[in-house]
Image: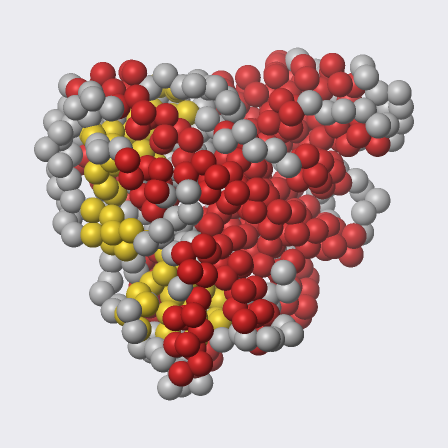
Amino acid sequence: MTENKMFCYQCQETAGCTGCTRSGVCGKTPDVAAMQDLLVWVTKGLSAVTTRLRAEGKAVEPQVNHLITWNLFTTITNANFDKEAIIAQVRDTLAVKAELLSQLADRSGLPEAALWTDGEPAYAVQAARVGVLATKDEDIRSLRELITYGLKGLAAYTKHANALLREDGAVDAFLQKALAATLDDSLTAEDLTALALETGKYGVQGMALLDEANTSAYGNPEITHVNIGVGKNPGILVSGHDLRDLEMLLQQTQGTGVDVYTHSEMLPAHYYPAFKKYPNFVGNYGNAWWKQTEEFASFNGPILMTTNCIVPPRDSYKDRLYTTGAAGYPGCTHIPGGAGEEKDFSALIEHAKRCAPPVEIETGEIVGGFAHAQVLALADKVVEAVKTGAIRKFVVMAGCDGRAKSRSYYTEFAKALPKDTVILTAGCAKYKYNKLDLGDIGGIPRVLDAGQCNDSYSLAVIALKLKEVFGLEDINDLPIVYNIAWYEQKAVIVLLALLSLGVKNIHLGPTLPAFLSPNVAKVLTDSFGIAGITTVEDDLALFFGGN
């Protein structure tokens, strides 16, 4: 049997739907995977220390909370491929942990990860000891990873809120307590299942925090027609999820002759009123993250990756790829700056001035901006359409996009939906159908895009409001079908959040997560009706009774 060079199964495209063992499908090399494993483990150790400090009545500073969320975000799929940057995070984490350990009155019972202090020469050896497969029991491993991946998603959303100077100490305390709990060998499968659901509860709270941060800073998203063509000036393309990064770039590009475009998950920035005041904010270029190798090449100008969803760049544009925040790629320029700090994007702006304008790859516009405030403003119209039967059902098709050919299912499913249905979406999954001409129902577009993956919170708010309006006891009595695509860990926290709200019968595809053991998958199936997808025809018959 060939020895694994690595082991990772946190994303939907993991090799053979079992795990990447030689190199990551994402492009992650074994040495980077090892340092990410170590970073997660030492962060769990730090979280055990912070949890003990809180139990002793001692304060944990916000910068420590930020370090923990930053670390987890660094290890999300397609976020950071820079081994040296990850090693630096490990060093910083161990230094902070050592300082906090000195403040503890009682160290008894702390896990090994909380006490480990070896230096860099020991990193590789220790990493090999503490990866995913270190937990031998398949079901315990599955639940620990489910929780860890949910916490990575929660950390991502918390980090975005922190960038806008919003904090929730209760969310940080829970995240760290739950992360530390994945090291506790005394917890049973039942204990961990309960913790996974609690993670979902705090996922709702974390997404609410980010929603409040975004809307307070930039206004409530509103119905917006977004240009998908190009202008004649050189441009900068911004991808990822961090709206604060985009804001700083827009401020710094005023009067420079450089235009700014969004890519993939940054598209929803166009829906916020605050960004509409910038005359050089031209539109959206391209599609979902996985098409970036061809779309970044034709864009011609520099690209700013604010978060995850990096595909290892081609040499033709690698020198134009810049990273910031928790994102990183070796050989690409990284723009420093943490929460509350002003970042200097002058290098990108000067680079853009030397570049040709983007090559036009499509023309027209797409419509979005249907977050909860906008949809609730249309509530009377929506409710009336449901009552009259003009809208038979809503279909939640939120989540992620990806490279797998099987994801064409979602395009064909959207095309085949009955004309009296409306798609509710958020996340980059929308790129599978947001440029289709699906029409409208009484002026209500049949694709209502709430925004980024974190804006799945809006879909929950909308569902809860509809439940109230129709006087229903159970959210599952609403005329809503859940057919969600997933890819990485932010989708995991969205799933856990929906489960914590009591939503059942969610269909998840194109495959169920590899990290769900058969027993854990059975619990989710039996308790919550979680299921996979089949064929478009069979799923339509299941959801709509064959008509």
Snapshot colouring: secondary structure
Percent x, y for residue 385?
Answer: 39, 76
Q: Is residue 468 visible?
A: yes
The residue shown at (51%, 38%) is 213
The residue shown at (20%, 20%) is 256
Quadrant assignment for the C terminus = bottom left
Residue 474 drawn above or below residue 430: below
Q: Residue furthest left?
A: 232
Q: Is residue 533 left or right of residue 288?
A: right
Percent x, y for residue 342?
Answer: 43, 19
Q: Is residue 416 left or right of residue 116?
A: left
Q: How many marks on residues?
A: 0
Nearer to us in this view, 506 or 524 = 506
Percent x, y for residue 506?
Answer: 54, 66
Q: Is residue 290 left or right of residue 1?
A: left
Percent x, y for residue 201?
Answer: 66, 52
The residue shown at (36%, 43%) is 272
Nearer to us in this view, 118 or 370 = 370
Nearer to us in this view, 186 or 157 = 157
Residue 284 drawn above or below residue 162: below
Nearer to us in this view, 393 or 85 = 393
Quadrant assignment for the N terminus = top right
Residue 283 drawn above or below residue 319: below
Q: Is residue 404 visible?
A: no
